[in-house]
Image (tube, rainbow, N blue to C red):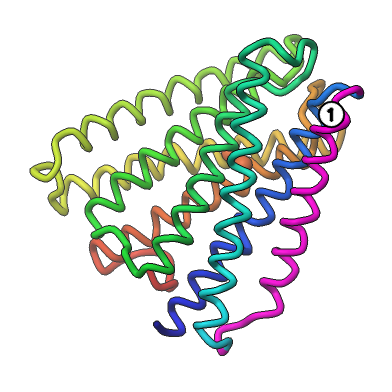
Amino acid sequence: MSNDFVLRSLDEIRFWSRIMKEHSLFLKLGFRCEDTQLINEANYFFSLFEQIEARSYGYNVSTDPQTIKSFNTEVRNAAANIWAFKRKVLGLILTCKLPGANNFPLLVDHVSREANYFRNRLEELNTGQLEPLPDAIIDENVFFLKIMADHAKFIGHLLDPSERKLVQQASEFSHDFDQLLFQAQDLSSMRPQSQTVPLLDQFLDQNRVSVVSLRDFKKTARDLIEACRIKSIIHPLLADHVFREAERFLMIIDLFEQALTGHGKSNLPL
Ligand SMILES: [Fe+2]
Ligand SMILES: [Fe+2]
């Protein structure tokens, strides 16, 4: 274990614990006032991840890797618990136990997939079992393309229907990312023969182009929502949240590009 392990662990925890904290808030806002037990559970996870986020900033590159290893285990357990909470909520929605609540089932499933991703990353870091680069490139892109496709759908459905132009743009992004996801699944199915440097490099380039334009669209939407210039039921923090997740995907694409070809826009270790 090394400084690299410490840096990577802290980077994952700082990014994803803030995300988990915000999911707790979004879920809470979608519950009905009488769902006090669920609201209490959401509040519990909000403060749990708030504390984890704060503690992660108390560590740095020179912290003992063993300390980080046990921190990772603790956070991994918290991620597993919020995953279980999200799946429980999904079950309640899909069996019509929360009529009138305002969380879309796809959104609850989506945030549970992000919790599962976070948990897996921490396990991989602690066991030192990171996927080989060609597999990681395909698997991370399959994961994040679905996340981006979902975001486009959420934006389209949470904008006011009278915002016709923006709803149309969101629907185009949804279609574009569904197509990219199918392409990624095709590339995955053709493993290992598809894992050549030119094919993977082209795959990354193509995905980057679409993620950059979706990221810019989210940024515009976020700014318009914050300035109260458009009609929607999108919380300003949700608009910023999905923008940050697109930025995260772009950073990962750049790290892969650099590892694959020796060129790239980032100097961070993969
Ligand atoms: Fe999220
Ligand atoms: Fe997301």
Q: Which residues are magenta?
A: 34-62
Secondary structure predominantly adopted by residues drawn in magenta = helix
Q: Is residue 205 above or below residue 147?
A: below
Front-lying residue, 165 or 145: 145
Residue drawn at the location 44% of the way across and 32% of the way down: 146
Which residue, given by chain and number where applicable, does mark 1 sit on?
229
Q: Quadrant of residue 237?
A: top right
Does the segment drawn in magenta span residue 174? no
Q: Quadrant of residue 242?
A: top right
Q: Position of residue 244 (x, y in %)?
A: 62, 49
Residue drawn at the location 66% of the way across and 49% of the way down: 19
Amino acid residing under circle 1: Arg
Residue drawn at the location 40% of the way across and 73% of the way down: 269
Quadrant (top left, top right, bottom left, bottom right) of the N terminus: bottom left
* Residue found at the far right of this picture: 33
Residue drawn at the location 59% of the way across and 51% of the way down: 79
Q: Is residue 263 left or right of residue 219?
A: left
Q: Is residue 251 above or below residue 235?
A: below
Label 1 packing within 10 angstroms: few (<14), some (14-19), many (20+): few
> Would the CB of label 1 be found within 8 Å of ligand 2?
no
Q: Quadrant of residue 133?
A: bottom left
Q: Position of residue 155 (x, y in %)?
A: 65, 25
Front-lying residue, 129 or 184: 129
Quadrant (top left, top right, bottom left, bottom right) of the C terminus: bottom left
Ligand 2 occupies quarter: top right
Does the segment drawn in magenta span residue 41? yes
